[in-house]
Structure formats: structure tokens, C-alpha cells
Image (cartoon, rainbow, N blue to C red):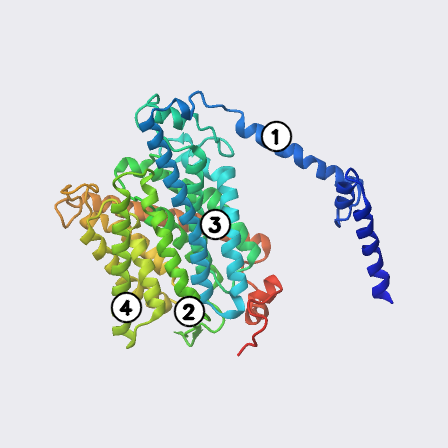
Amino acid sequence: MTTALHAAPSRRNHRRLQEASLLNGPMLLVKSIRGLRTNRALIWLATVPLALLGLGVFNFAAQAEVGLSDLTGAQAAAFLADNLWLFIATILVIFMNAGFAMVEAGMCRQKNAVNILAKNLFVFALAVTAYWFIGYSLMYGGSVIDGWVYFQGLFVDPDPSGAIECAAGLAGEGCSQLVPSVDFLFQAAFAGTAATIVSGLVAERVKFGEFVVFSLVLTAFIYPIAGSWQWNGGWLSELGFIDFAGSSIVHSVGGWAGLVGAMLLGPRIGKFVDGKAQAMPGHNMAIATLGALVLWIGWYGFNPGSELAMDQYVAYVAVTTTLAAAGGAIAATIISTVTSGKPDLTMIINGILAGLVSITAGCGNMTFSGSWIAGFVGGVIVVFSVSALDAAGIDDPVGAFSVHGVCGVWGTLVIGLWGVEGMDPGVAGIGLFNGGGLSQFLIQALGAAAYGLWTVATCWIAWSIIGGFFGGIRVSEEEELQGLDVGEHGMEAYPDFASS
């Protein structure tokens, strides 16, 4: 009886909507939505078109003085090729979010899979929003404190006139023919990568909401300010520091930020017994392996895309990237076999990623053989780094700090060991071992240390304030034992399978 009484009104509403005229139908449809049945709600809804109109006026207020049709054939071809290539590279970098999600979810336990997937999916939306609002301006704006702090106002100015003028040869030397919109997308994808790295270090015990707030702070302020020191002509760039695609700027910043969170959170329940690290196997190594391959493919947007043009050097960077990944995989497989008796799939995965991170800073300043060796050393480092963190009592569920933090530093330093001036054949060595002396190594070491100190200090403050304001950043013991999927999201990743 009760069910019938509740069901009848919905059928009457359905009939009224079917019988409504073309003029009355839209209003009946709106009023049928829960929460939009009052006049006040409809007034608020009416403001949406006005807001969109205002945003459109803001975006298209600036008109280009020189149009695409004013470019010569060669100018237009170069302009379109550069912007199209960066747009494709951006898509590849964004797709890396799927790889990070799959690696992290696969290497963690089944009861936390939904939480991990939600974090990796949502953090990119947060990163793009925060970076659009203020992060891009802090990273690529005008100088406020020369060499250290930059700012150009809130939001991103999409006016393409400067890029077209540059393509036409009407702007000054050193201008860019990348339109602001595509450049913003590419840089925002990098910001999202830094935040996603943090997720792996704090997996299986961090509160979802508190992680969200931290990701906003990281991508809006901490990462952009540090990035401007190199990629906007800041003090590190003036010193001659080299970080082509972000071994330090993106990967080590994400690694250090996550390490601080992991230390404040403490290890997962059961990870350490009597001071000894206990294995907590991932629940789906097939997904983790697929995720590693997705990341490898995405790296062809990350590194070659950082050339910021479609030219003869893009393929060169792609090769150095590939060789380093191969060297890392081989080294990690060999070392894990020697240390544990059998090849460890998780170490093969992390070896590939370690090789990729190890070449990210030097992919434009390394020979092919130097790239493979850099990746190989990265693969060795990552295996021992994972063991070292366990010995130190720090719980890193997926080895994210070893891959991104430690190998990010290594990838920065190796340029000072056997890096070269560029990608042309026969260019001079700039490293300690190939005739360049000690100076470049010291500059690289200074830069790596600066990013580590800045990130640790600012993230310690951010994590502490967030924890103090929200009553801690770790879930309850009961929720952790039950699994964050149920406690934080009210669902399970595999509801049709019983837990073993």
C-alpha cells in the first residue's frame, strides 16, 4: 500500500510532462528535478546563463590584431604544427593519469581500490582548476620578486594574438608561437602529475577530503612557485640549471610532498611487525602492468612534448626516453633476481618508471648511450631505495618516492656527470666524466637540493595545518581495517567477490 501511494505521483508527473505543450514542457521538466521546485532555486538556476555569458565575454574580449590568414604558407605550417604537436603531447600526458591510477590500484589491496581510483581521477580535476585559477600565473607570470616570485593576475588569458604575431615575425626575439590555451593545458597536465605522485605515497590510510585540500595547495602554490625558478627564467635558470622535462620540478617535488605526508601519517596497520617490514601484496598485478605500459606511452608526451615545438629534435628525445626506460627495466630485473632469488614483477614495473624519471631532466642533454646508462643506474637505485625506506620505517605502498623522488634527484644529477650541451651530433660534454668539469654537477646538485628543501618545508606546513584544522589526515583504525572503499566512498570495487 505504501509503495503504491508513493509511486502514483511520479506516474502523474510523467503523464503531465507528456501532455505539456512545447512552451510549458521545459519548465515542467526543470520543476520535476528535486531541489529545483521552489522559485528561489529557479532564480539561482537563471544566473547560470548569465555567468556563462560573462565568462564568454571575458574569454573573447581580446581580439588578435593579426589573424592566421595573414601568415605565409611556411609560417602557418610551422604555427599549426607546433600547436598541434603540443596538443597531442598534452593528451598523452593527461592519459598518464590512467597509468598512475592502474599502477597504484593494482599494487595496493582490493579493499582500497575505489579510494585510489577516486583520488587519481579527482586530483586531475582539482589540479586543472587550481592551476587555471592561479597556478599558471604564479609559474609563468611577470616578475614580482626577480628570479623568485612571479604573478600575472588570476585566471589564464587565452588571447592568441601574441602567438600569431610571433609566427608572423612581428614579435621580439625569444617569443613563443604557442597559443596560451594549448600551453596552459600542457603545463596543467604536468601540475596534475606532481599531485598524482603524492597519492601513491599516502595510499590506503589518508582521508579523501584532506588529500583533496592538500592537492589544491600543491598545484595552486607550491609546485608553480618552484617551477618558475627554472621554466620562467628564475634564479636556477640564470645559474645554468638544466631540467628539460621535470625530473626535479615535477617528479621530485611530487615525491618529496608525498614523503612528508607518508611520514606524518605513519605506516599502514600491519606493515611493520617488531621493526621488520611485512609484505602487503597488491591485488591485481595485471592492472599494475598495464598501468606501467600506459605511463611509458604517456611519457612520449611528457618528454618530447617539452621540446615545445615540432622539430627535428622531438624524435631524438623520444629515443633517449625509450633507451632509459629499457635500461631501468633490465637493471631492476637483474638486481631483484640477485637480491630475492627471482625476478620481481613490481620491481620490473618500478624499474621502467625509474628509468623514465631518470632521463626526464636530461632527455635533451644526453647521448643515446648515456641515456641507457642513466636509466640502468636508476633501475639499480630504485630496488635499493625501496629496501632503504622499509628499513627506515617509512611506508611507501607503491615505491613512489623511490621512483619519483630518489630517481628524480638522480636524473637531475646525472646531467652533471655525463651530460652534453644539446642534441646535435658532436656537441661538447658538460659533465664531470666527459670533459665538462665540476661546475655543472654542482649547479645540478644545488637545484635538486633547492627543490627538496622547498617542498619538504612548505608541504610539512601544509599537511600540518590541514591535519590540525580537520582533526588529522589519517582515517580511523576501524576504517583502515575495513577498507577505505566502504568507509570513505560507501562502495566496493568488486562487490560480487567475497574477500579471502
Other-residue count near label 3 (Cα within 10 Å), few / some / many at <14 / 14–19 / ≥20: few
> In whole angstroms, how far apart are the C-alphas of marks 2 and 3?
36 Å
Quarter of the view holding residue 423: top left
Residue 149, above or below 365:
above
Mark 2 or mark 3, whichever is nearer to me: 2
Pinpoint residue 342: horizontal percent, then vertical percent. 29, 76
Q: Tell me if 491 is positioned left or right of 131 in this view.
A: right
Q: Earlier in the sequence, mark 4 or mark 1?
A: 1
Label 2 amino acid? Met
In the rendered structure, are the residues bearing label 3 and label 1 in contact, judged by CB atoms less than 8 Å apart?
A: no
The residue that mark 2 highlights is 285
Image position, residue 104 (x, y; %): 44, 62
Residue matched to label 1: 54
| Tag 1: amino acid | Gly
Give the total of numbered labels: 4
Place of residue 401 in the rendered image (x, y in percent of width and height, measured from the top left) = 38, 59
* Label pair 2/4, CB-CB below 8 angstroms: no
Q: Which mark is residue 40?
A: none
Task: Please name the residue that numbered disc 3 is placed on.
Answer: 461
Q: Are marks 1 and 2 in contact (CB under 8 Å)?
A: no
